[in-house]
Image (spheres, grey):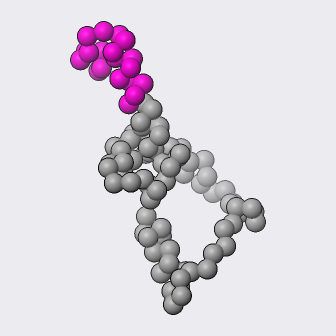
């Protein structure tokens, strides 16, 4: 598709590499959606890799027992007067 629009192979290669890198960077593997600022959330939603990686991971993890080690846990204390659910509401909604 890009070859038909651009005049030469070098321009096409540069543009395809740029789009592929942006799709990879903003797919949610290197950075979660919550950690992305403003406009880049659009890139997260627009990236085809976001959905492809989601399908691959959910297919591979289906039916497998997941056991977290102590090194993967992060204990914390919520703000005064809040429950853990209230404190993590933003994370739990996504």
User: Is 94 colored magenta in this rendering?
Assistant: no
Q: Which range of residues does the magenta coloring cover?
A: 1-19
The image shows residue 82 at horizontal and vertical percentages of 51, 86
Residue closer to the observer: 32 or 77: 77
User: Residue most toward the right?
Assistant: 70
Task: Report the number of discs.
Answer: 0
* 7 relative to 52 in the view: left or right: left
**Which residue occupies 42% across, 37% down?**
23
Which quadrant is home to the C terminus?
Answer: bottom left
Residue closer to the observer: 27 or 55: 27
Write down the quadrant of residue 69 in the picture.
Answer: bottom right
Whether 9 is drawn above or below 38: the answer is: above
Which quadrant is home to the N terminus?
Answer: top left
User: Residue most toward the top?
Assistant: 8
Residue closer to the observer: 17 or 49: 17
User: Residue most toward the left?
Assistant: 5
User: Is 17 colored magenta in this rendering?
Assistant: yes
Q: Main secondary structure of the magenta part?
A: helix
Whether 26 is drawn above or below 11: the answer is: below
Whether 5 is drawn above or below 57: the answer is: above
* 79 relative to 44 in the view: left or right: right
The image shows residue 77 at horizontal and vertical percentages of 61, 80
The image shows residue 42 at horizontal and vertical percentages of 32, 48
User: Does residue 52 appear in the picture of this structure?
Assistant: no
**Which residue occupies 30% across, 20% down?**
2
User: Does residue 48 appear in the picture of this structure?
Assistant: yes
**Which residue occupies 45% across, 32% down?**
21
The image shows residue 47 at horizontal and vertical percentages of 38, 41
């Amino acid at each position: 598709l890009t070859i038909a629009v651009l005049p030469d192979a070098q321009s096409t290669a540069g543009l395809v590499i740029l789009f592929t890198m942006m799709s990879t960077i903003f797919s949610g593997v290197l950075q979660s959606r919550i950690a992305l600022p403003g406009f880049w959330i659009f890139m997260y939603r627009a990236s085809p890799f976001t959905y492809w990686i989601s399908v691959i991971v959910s297919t591979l993890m289906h039916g497998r027992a997941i056991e977290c080690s102590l090194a993967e846990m992060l204990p914390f204390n919520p703000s005064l007067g809040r429950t853990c659910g209230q404190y993590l509401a933003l994370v739990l909604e996504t």
